[in-house]
Image: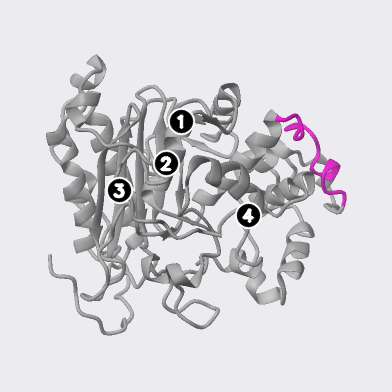
Amino acid sequence: MIIAAVALSASLVLGKGLPTSAPRTVGMSADRLATVDRVVRRGITAGAYPGAAVVVGRKGYAVWQKGYGRLSWTSTSAAVDATETIYDLASLTKVIATTTAAMILYDEGKLDLQAPVQRYLPEFTGDMKELVTVEHLLTHRSGLPPGRQLWKTARTPAEARQQVLETRLQQRPGALYNYSDLGPDILGFIVERITGQSLDAFTEARIFAPLGMEDTGWRPAASLTARIAPTEVTPPRGYPVRGEVADEAAFALGGIAGHAGLFGTATDLAVFAQMMLNGGEYQGTRIVKAETVRRFTTEVRDHRALGWEVAAGERGAGQYLSKAAFGHVGYTGTSLWIDPERDLFVILLTNRVHAARARRPGIIIADVRHDLADAAALAVTDEPLLRQVAWPRRFRVDQAADWTRGRPLAKRPTTKPIRK
């Protein structure tokens, strides 16, 4: 459960993000970083999302930490605060919670990446399932389909769990990359079987609490609703969603799933990112070993590491992060990219699934992610290679390619626009 944050002013206090610093003190250009403002605000004015939280960090400091716009489209909605606003993190759950839990168990010798899933979950049976390994789950090469409409077929979380385990493979394990939410779900079941704890309890005890990530967790308390950015307006469950996981399959699984369900703030994620940059440790608290961080974040195949994606010029990583960079994105409009070669990270949290006014909000958020990563990477001034890279004449948000194609928007509930 997320614990409500206490108002604290000192930036060095564990649980309220990283200490802040001027860009120049960590080898970055403040003028170039200012492009972040234009990029993120362009997405708001285009109607892709009502607000956003951004943190750019380098060398142990947050150098750009800011909220933009509001939690929703109404003029009376609260302004976004990078420290206080809680977002549905969507598929960032896969890496921040589920993959990190797997890393911990791998460290402890309790999880064998080459072992068949059936070693841990004997009930995972069916044609060719004996060939599925833990590594296959982490690299999306298990043969499982992308997902299942559990909200249509399961009446309880237990039924939803059983249906995940009974899902038939679409191809031979290891043969093809096929991004699947079911793989992380099953990995979450493995974590629970090994530890004897629920996924939320284990991740709270072993990741979030030790790091002071007090606004990160599952199924937020009702007392936090005012701080949570709303998501879907007309979902299958029949009512607007705020403070419940937007992903319908994760909701069917009880709100706690290996692929989605985690909520958190941008400043909490900054602490997590710094822990990864530090090789698994933050302020004297070690979460995983440095060699485990390296193994799980090194490309295996098809631009995938173990749980993580690696930077490949797309998927929000931009063009200028190093080849060692890794990260992930989330359907609700979230992203996290970490570049160990430059000791740099970039976090973007939005709720682009909330009553988007743009025709193609998915295209817009992809361009914003891309430009944000580029602006951060090109703001680095203490690397000779980057000093030789010409500053782009136009970013993707300036070109707005394919932003307005497609059918007209459906009529949205009447709200007052935000005045900028």
Residue 9 covered by magenta stretch: no
Query: What whole-number distance in Å separates the C-alpha atoms at marks 4 and 3?
Result: 25 Å
Q: Is the Cβ of the residue at disc 1 closer than 8 Å to that at disc 2?
A: yes
Q: Of circles 4 and 3, which is in front?
A: 4
Mark 4 Cα within 10 Å, few/some/many (few <14, many 20+)?
many
Q: Name the outermost residue toward the top.
A: 384
Q: Which residue is mark 2?
A: 14
- Residue type of the residue flagged with mark 4: Asp
- Do the CB atoms of the residues marked 4 and 3 lie less than 8 Å apart? no
Report the amino acid beneath label 2: Leu
Is 121 within the magenta?
yes
In this picture, residue 31 sits left or right of residue 140: left
Predominant SS along the magenta part? loop
Marks 2 & 3, CB-CB < 8 Å contact: no
Residue occupied by mark 1: 283
Which residues make up the magenta segment? 108-122
Mark before the other along the chain sequence, 2 or 3: 2
The residue that disc 3 covers is 54
Amino acid type assigned to the residue bearing label 3 in the image? Val
CA gap between label 4 and label 1 equals 23 Å
| Local SS, label 1 | loop
Q: Nearer the viewer, mark 1 or mark 3?
A: 1
Q: Quadrant of residue 110?
A: top right
Residue that appears at 26% across and 43% down: 371
* Residue holding disc 4: 200
Q: Earlier in the sequence, mark 4 or mark 1?
A: 4
Q: Mark 1 or mark 3, which has the lower sequence index?
A: 3
